[in-house]
Image (cartoon, grey):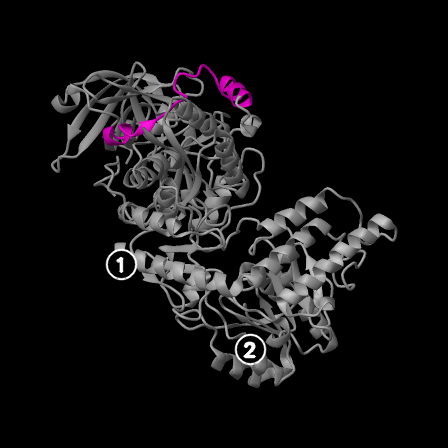
Amino acid sequence: MRVLAAMSGGVDSAVAAARAVEAGHDVVGVHLALSRMPGTLRTGSRGCCTIEDSRDAWRACDILGIPYYVWDFSERFKEDVVDDFIAEYAAGRTPNPCMRCNERIKFAALLEKALALGFDAVCTGHYAKVIENADGSRELHRAADWAKDQSYVLGVLTHEQLKHSMFPLAETPSKAEVRAEAERRGLSVANKPDSHDICFIPDGDTRGWLEERIELSEGNIVDVDGETIGTHPGANAFTVGQRKGLKLGRPAPDGKPRFVLEIRPKENTVVVGPERMLAVDQLRGIKVSWAGLPIPAVDTGEEFDCMAQVRAHGDPVDARAHVERDEDGREHLVVRLIEPMRGVAPGQTVVIYQGTRVLGQATLDSARSLERPDLAPAR
Amino acid sequence: MYLDHAATTPLSAPALAALTTELSRSGNPSSLHGSGRRARRVVEDARETLARAAGAHASEVIFTSGGTEADNLAVKGLFWARSDADARRTRILCSAVEHPAVQDAVEWLERHEGADVIWLPVTEEGIVRLDVLEQELDAGADRIALVTVMWANNEVGALQPVADITALAARHGIPVHSDAVQAFGSVPVSFADSGLATMAVSGHKIGGPVGVGALLVGRAVKLTPVQHGGGQERDIRSGTLDTAGIAAFAAAAEGAVAHLPAESQRLVDLRDQLIAGVGRVVPEAVLRGPRVDRLPGNAHFTFPGCEGDSLLFLLDMAGVESSTGSACTAGVPRPSHVLLAMGLSETEARGAQRFSLGHTSTPEDVDALVAALPEAYERARKAGMSGQASSIQTAGTGFS
């Protein structure tokens, strides 16, 4: 196969590309330039698309003996990921930009260009597994190493995208193994720190970054009874479940910490309350997609057993889900949680699994609070 | 098939011989003992050889680490010397199509040294507008520190009217620098006849090694040094002289200039075959730069509807090595400032591809390009522009 290896300059994508080469594929390395104004050097685990990352990817390709190119997706990235991230926060939601990047950039813009140029697949260093069934259909599964498993952020991939995706790190027992393999292969990125945080917010200060981009106006912080107990500099910069940064002088009556329960962007109000009020037992999602062919219950609308996960490294919980269709024929995913979850924010993605298999995902639109039935549906 | 001689060209046989001979010897040309004197002899022979090849006097040759250093020394050195002599002289007239070695040096002076820069526009063929130059000279001659216009453009091969430019500037006594890195060895270049104050040349573009070049500096021209040290080169440039590199550079220059009349005609014929061949298989391709006043080995096109880097990639896969022509940061392609200055839109400029021929080029190279191009162009066009919307079915399709 002709394989395009997306090379971030990190150790995972370098080892993934090495394995693709070793498997006998015809591999070309491509670094995605996602920032219009790349910095020169990385600082620790922060930042992305620096010139140093590009050089590291280049060096890895040279060591592997494969061609290396830089493709500029900075405009698409800005529109589809960065601007979307800002717009979602401005609307009081909590988006996951990495998922958006996988959905729109790596496995869409990049994949499309690759296919047009004659490639068969895009290979990345994600920890997840694609299984090909006897009928040629694909399934997405968790990686062997659950601690590193990244199937959540890939849950947004469609069957068509999965058919052209290659994740050679699927069966790797641990990240340490990947580093050791990089060392063995003479890849100089073997000891490069992992990337964390959001790549386009180099100093990791999401709040500060958002505050420069979203028009914030002072508003009230209210408790669940609607009583104003403080002010905030702008509701949009808060996230459901957030505890820090509320700056409420007055302690809660029970003396326990208060958390953001809800953001009401229209009223510019932040609702706070005790942690137990963050618990939800039902999720409703829109923008549903299926990672592979949907299971039969999707069409019939029957309830099925699954596990639901709402964060990249959150623990999955047992659930029962079913699909409803609105008058426009659009799917809505309804997930009843067997055990309640805490701190679920609109805009987050719920990925549902059966065993190790990723069934699909939806963007959370509303959640039913156990203790605040008056709020259901929250939005 | 190597069609990127403007980036670098293989070492010529005499240059390789000179280089290996001198690399096996030792001696600092600035030392006074025997081995120093031997090395000095080699450097001074080379200086005379290079001076002859460039139509200059030996004392006008300042050896540098390459074209970029020579351009920096000329632009900054002239700016500082001229503005020190008269503080009103802060203006630089600079063509809009300079190589980054000049462009970036000029922009640095603008940001850090109070230079005021006037970018001289070019015609749609990429040739500097003499009428604008004349207006600017007449409008504020006493404020101008220098004029800088390259001899031949590295992207589209446009030869600039250097003699006309120096004649206009001479009326006001204003020094002119020219980056002749692409021109020297390809077209007749005489420093003495040019009327230039300074002229930059480079080794590896003419069959010499990488890492050596020279700035030709007229005997009466004052330059403020950029790097400081032992003052080895006329107190203008410091650093131990690279005897082997200098000897090889001079050998390459001597060969290139000796073969120039025949070789340039051979390259013009080959280049015209290439242009005709490209036009035959991809009629949509647009030749950029002048038809006539053009470097013999340069052919530059824009290919509508595709990214230059896609085309480069596909040609590379087919064994044909070309270039998008413009400089890049960490490999990120940007629309060429040269093409934009020529009036192209960003979209047009992004489809740029440069094919450059040199001393090892053969008709087979051209045939290989013409054979590989149709499929590469077709595919590159399908891949389109990276800014276009995706047609891949995604989770968000139909929602946002």
Tag count in the figure?
2
In this image, A191 relative to B358: left or right?
right
Instruction: Give neighbour class at mark 1: few <14, some 14-19, many 20+ (Cα, 10 Å).
Output: some
Residue closest to the eye, B221 or B21 = B21
The reply to whether the C-beta atoms of the residues labelled 1 and 2 are less than 8 Å apart is no
Instruction: State the image coordinates of residue B83 (x, y, percent, origin top left).
Output: 70, 74
Residue closest to the eye, B97 or A356 = B97
Instruction: State the image coordinates of residue B48 (x, y, percent, origin top left).
Output: 71, 63
Residue A168 magenta:
yes
Instruction: State the image coordinates of residue A165 (x, y, percent, origin top left).
Output: 32, 28
In this image, A342 relative to B48: left or right?
left
Give, as a three-letter code, the residue at label 1: Glu
Which residue is label 2 attached to?
A: B163
Mark 1, secondary structure of its residue? loop
Q: Magenta span covers which residues?
A: A158-184
Which residue is label 1 attached to?
A: B284
Front label number (1 vs 2): 2
